[in-house]
Image: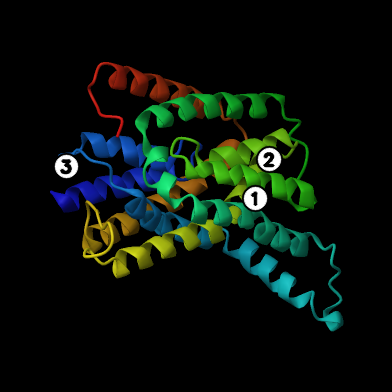
Amino acid sequence: MGFIEAIILGLVQGLTEFLPISSSAHLRIVGEFLPSATDPGATFTAITQLGTEAAVVIYFWKDITRIIGRWFRHWRPSEGIPKNDPDVRLGWLVIIGTIPIVLVGFFAQEYIRSVFRNLWLVAIVLIFFGVLLWLADWLGKRTRDMREMSYRDGILVGLAQVLALIPGVSRSGATTSMGLALGYTRPAAARFAFLLAIPAVFGSGLYELYHGITCDPATDVCVEVYGPLETLIATIVAFGVGLGVIAFLMAYISKRSFLPFVIYRLALGGALIVLLSVGAISAL
């Protein structure tokens, strides 16, 4: 049954990671309805995100290699690439924008693994940040391109990414909402959100992978529902599904609003509150 559950959770991770509906919240919720009826855990969640983030690298490979290449080459005067080159600036923005979530993620491990995964909190933030996404999408000017992003805006989007440590917020939802609020187009806000997530997600996933490998049951708390093989299967499934979802989302938001995702977040948050209120599922 563990392998079937892992495949299901991999599908959920791949389907929800890039949509502004929070993959970590869905893994947390779906885990309650599987035969094991338990939270898959922060380690499992972070490692499976390596699969979906690998899909981001493949989909945005040209953007990533161009930005990295020009960022390194601008240090050589002979290349003639100015410091204010849009790609050089984007490279710096990804670096600077990643710092807040690295610091908070490292020092808030205790809360990330416990308090933040309370389903009451998940339900509330699903609704609250759904409303914020709707307001940002509705009121944002949506006139600016990603290559126009300033250092101030990049830092603000980076700060918004910190909120993604709470299941239910959604990394793409928080960062895209900030981008929309700052006046960027939907594709521009989403594209920068994807690029910004790469170092943070890979860093978190690799850290959790190392933690899972080196965890000593005699001295540490090593409570994981799924073993290495199940986690690997879920990660591979998440990669394949995630690649298709990225293509869908980028095509969708070029012509349509985020309203369907807002409605879904409100409905899911409301349903979760009802289930918790009647005792159908446990908050912890």
Q: Residue at x 54, y 57 (%)?
A: 200
Q: Give the alpha-carbon distance from disc 2 to disc 1, as whole Å.
A: 8 Å
- Closer to the camera in the image, 96 or 177: 96
Please name the amino acid that badge 1 sits on. Answer: Phe
| Residue 149 visible, this angle | no
Outermost residue to the left: 1
Q: Which mark is residue 169?
A: none
Where does label 3 land, which residue? 36
> Between tags 3 and 1, which lies in front?
3
Tag 2 secondary structure? helix
> Is 218 left or right of 113, judged from the image as shown?
left
Please name the amino acid that badge 3 sits on. Answer: Ser
Of mark 3 and mark 2, the one earlier in the sequence is: 3
Disc 3 to disc 1: CB gap under 8 Å: no
Where does label 2 land, which residue? 179
> Is 16 left or right of 192, judged from the image as shown?
left
Where does the image place residue 144, in percent across and percent down from the top left? 77, 41
- Closer to the camera in the image, 191 or 177: 177
Where does the image place residue 45, in percent across and percent down from the top left? 36, 50
> Is 101 left or right of 73, judged from the image as shown?
left
Q: Give the alpha-carbon distance from disc 3 to disc 1, as whole Å.
A: 37 Å
Tag 1 secondary structure? helix
Where does label 1 land, which residue? 192
Of mark 2 and mark 1, the one earlier in the sequence is: 2
Way the structure is coloured: rainbow
Q: Give the alpha-carbon distance from disc 3 to disc 2, as whole Å.
A: 39 Å
